[in-house]
Image: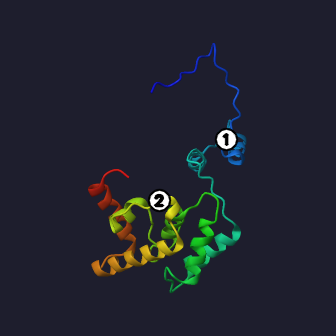
Amino acid sequence: MPFKKFDVGTDKLDFSFSYNNAETALLRKELAGNVNVDINDLRRVSLWKLDRVLEVTEETLECLRKVAAAEDLSVDATLSKRAVEMLVDSQGVGFPMASAMLKFLRPDVFPIIDVRAYRALTGTKPYYSTYTLTRYIAYAKELANIASRLGRPLSDIDEQLYCFDAKHNGKI
């Protein structure tokens, strides 16, 4: 199927552009002509481009601080469940992103759930709409079991499954 090519002589450009409106306005205001641009500004543009504007409440941040400080924490503890749910309820965060954030805070408790690692573990491909707290906890427990059986840190297992899937299962 051939694509329509814009013709400046006959076509009009009178569309209403709408994309991440609040963040677009902020980025335009803060970055236009900014001679002090830094890596965090570029990361913010990258997230904007990926339609990943992140917004979390102070209550969510406080919950994450408690997760980071908890001495004896399990993935199915009330605090853990609350943290996952609060993150997933935040703008720009789904289960894969929430699990990545939590893994960096507590690699001993939270593995990242993503398509590749999940597919390597189960032989099935999850879809974004099928992620649930129950599914995540079951997945995390299974990875903890594998870590225990192999005598490896939990933080290695999701990464190894990701690599396993990339090698053996090809494209997502």
Q: Could you say which disc has been placed on residue 62 in the image?
A: none
Q: Residue, x 49% and y 68% (percent of image)?
A: 104
Q: Earlier in the sequence, mark 1 or mark 2?
A: 1
* Amino acid type indicated by mark 2: Tyr
Foreground of the two, 129 or 8:
129
Residue sitting at the far bottom: 72
Disc 2 secondary structure class: loop
Residue 63 lies in what quarter of the image? bottom right
x and y percentages locating residue 62 in the rendered image = 66, 74
Q: Residue, x 53% and y 23% (percent of image)?
A: 4
Residue bearing the label numbered 1: 31
Residue 163 lies in what quarter of the image? bottom left
Q: Could you say which disc has been placed on residue 127 in the image?
A: 2
* Amino acid type indicated by mark 1: Leu
x and y percentages locating residue 140 in the rendered image = 43, 75
> Count of labels shown?
2
Disc 1 secondary structure class: helix
Neighbor class of circle 2 (other Cα within 10 Å; few <14, some 14-19, many 20+) is few
Establish if 148 lies above or below 28. below
Establish if 5 lies above or below 89. above
Q: Is residue 138 left or right of residue 71?
A: left
Foreground of the two, 87 or 130:
130
Image quadrant holding the N terminus, namely top left
Can you tell which of label 1 and label 2 is closer to the viewer?
2
Residue 107 lies in what quarter of the image? bottom left
